[in-house]
Amino acid sequence: MITMATSVSAGNRGERDHGDCWVSFNPDGSVLDIVVEQCESDERKETIETFVYQVLKQCQVASGSLKIYDQGAPAFVMAARIEACLRQASYPDARYLPGMIDQNTYQSSAKRMRLSRLYLPGNTPKLAGKGAGSGAHGIILDLEDSVAPARKFEARIMVRNTLQQVDFAGAERMVRINQLPLGLDDLREIAGQNVHMILIPKCESAETIKQVNEIIAEVNGPEGPPVFLMPIIESCLGVLRAEEMASAADNVVALTIGLEDYTADLGVKRTYEATESFYARSHIVNVCKAYGIQAIDSVFSDVSDMDALADNVVRSKTIGFEGMGCIHPRQVAVVHKNFAPDIKEIDKAKKIVMAFNDAMAKGLGVVALGSKMIDPPVVERAQQTISQAVAMELLTEDWVAAS
């Protein structure tokens, strides 16, 4: 934390940074001086100046020099950049919360469908809105790998404001925090912003999950909405301790694997065939199935090869994964298409569900399909397939009601 009177900055002002801004602040001086540059019009300049005064007044800043290089940033982005500067200068307690829009007050659920999750850099605000329009089941605002170490402080403020002000279009609202202990500071900033799921990178123990939950409880309070956890297993030790993490807390609803770091730890090259990670991935799937949580596969890093991605998804589904990560919006549709139940799976599930409903209607204690007895886990899996098919519009709600 910088405590001396010195100029600090936050934000971006490159050619590709439309929708962002760059802010510098120097607390020196006896008066308040605001300079706005690169505005598209005098009217916008006046609007920005008025807004900046509002932010500074709420943050109790009465003097200093603040400069903004505008590139079409919305108010919540500008506020985040200003706040980051103030808190790194002489105002560590400065806060300006834009407020949660109505579209972001919805909740999630432990068993919701998570075929896809799309990673977006947390310090690049223009991508958040585009990501929400991708159709991904989850949108991840990333504070870890996609953010440079020197920018992590300002990134967590930006992610907090993004969670408040960007319409996620019904997607699950996720944040990947940094590896602990830095990730605990991330949580203190974002846990109270109706974030649905926290992804914990390089997780290797139940103790890490306990620390995360302690901060969530501290920020969210006893009446706060549930915050689910998805530990990311990225090491050999993490693979061996997968069961410990799966059973660490009730809000652990999924495990996923990060194959770039895992194969590096293994000392081998990651390949399309993924034979080098088959043991780890299969082990994680088995652990997840045993504890009734979701097994989510790693990202596929080649964003240009959709055929290879489709093949990878098919292999992933074959060994029991229920979703995977995406690093580009164009990957989402391919992931959904290839994880979705096919015609044979849907027809089989329909027959099992109809047999189950028939048995229940007749008061029978057992369920049979032809000459085969149907166990409860098989029925549950069939019901999940039907629910997934309906959600993906492969089967109509009318069929479910009729059955």
Image (spheres, rainbow, N blue to C red):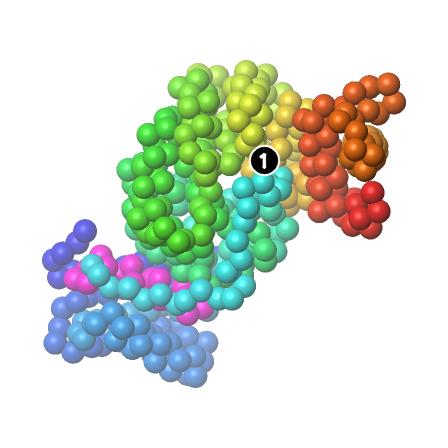
Which quadrant would residue 346 be assigned to in this image? Answer: top right
Which quadrant would residue 319 be assigned to in this image? Answer: top right
Please tell me which residue is depicted at 33% across the width and 30% down the height of the picture: 207
- The image position of residue 378, as x and y in percent, is 71, 26
Residue at numbered disc 1:
324
Residue type at numbered disc 1: Met
- The image position of residue 243, as x and y in percent, is 46, 22
Q: Is residue 63 left or right of residue 17?
A: left
| Viewer-proximal residue among 38 and 240 | 240
| Viewer-proximal residue among 7 and 240 | 240
Residue 247: in magenta span: no
Q: Residues within 10 Å of mark 1 (few under 14, many from 20)?
A: many
- State the count of labels: 1
- In the image, which residues are magenta? 74-91
Q: Is residue 93 visible?
A: yes
Which quadrant would residue 213 be assigned to in this image? Answer: top left
Q: Is residue 172 left or right of residue 337?
A: left
- The image position of residue 386, as x and y in percent, is 75, 39
